[in-house]
Image: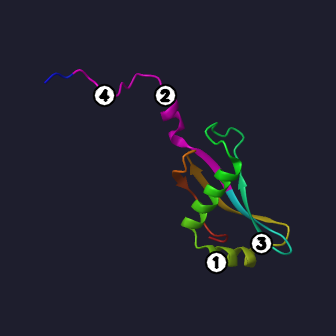
Amino acid sequence: MSDDGAGDADPTAPETAESADDEGDTFGVGIHVTSDEFRFVVHVPSDIDSGWRDPDEFQRLIEVATWDRLDRPETLRAVARTTAEGETVTLGTVTMRPGGDVIDHSLAPPGE
């Protein structure tokens, strides 16, 4: 059995595009309060990865990731208690890769 080194990573090799994207993009998440509704808001980084091709799709993915991690009814009740009309409350951030994998988040209901 020979050891030809196949499959071994070279620590001195330059970073590939795939490994450069491992960090994902960080999106701010908030709720904007109007007189008749709450609007889910996604703040998009100016240097967003080119792998995000459809803005509606990544915003939907961020929204799904947010409500997977926060209790939606309780969070919206907290927004109603703490946020005046015309204001936007920040819920935190979601870091995600273009494929939809969540790398990290700092989500919390307002007041926590």
**SS under mark 2:** loop
Amino acid at pointer 3:
Thr
In front of the other: 87 or 65: 65
Is the C-beta separation of discs 4 and 2 under 8 Å?
no
In the image, the segment drawn in magenta is 4-28
Question: Which residue is denoted by mark 4 in the rendering?
Answer: 8
Crowding near pointer 1: few (<14 within 10 Å), some, many (20+)? few
Compared to residue 70, the image places residue 52 above or below, namely above
C-alpha distance separating marks 3 and 2: 44 Å
Q: Earlier in the sequence, mark 4 or mark 2?
A: 4
Residue on which disc 2 sits: 16
How many circles with numbers are drawn on the protein?
Answer: 4
Dot 3 surroundings within 10 Å: few (below 14), some, or many (20 or more)?
Answer: some
How far from the left and from the top, in percent, is residue 55?
A: 70, 48
Q: CA distance from mark 1 to mark 2?
A: 42 Å
Quarter of the figure that contains the C terminus: bottom right
Per the image, label 4 sits on a secondary structure element best described as loop
* Residue linked to disc 3: 83
**Mark 1: secondary structure:** helix
- On screen, 42 above or below 53? below
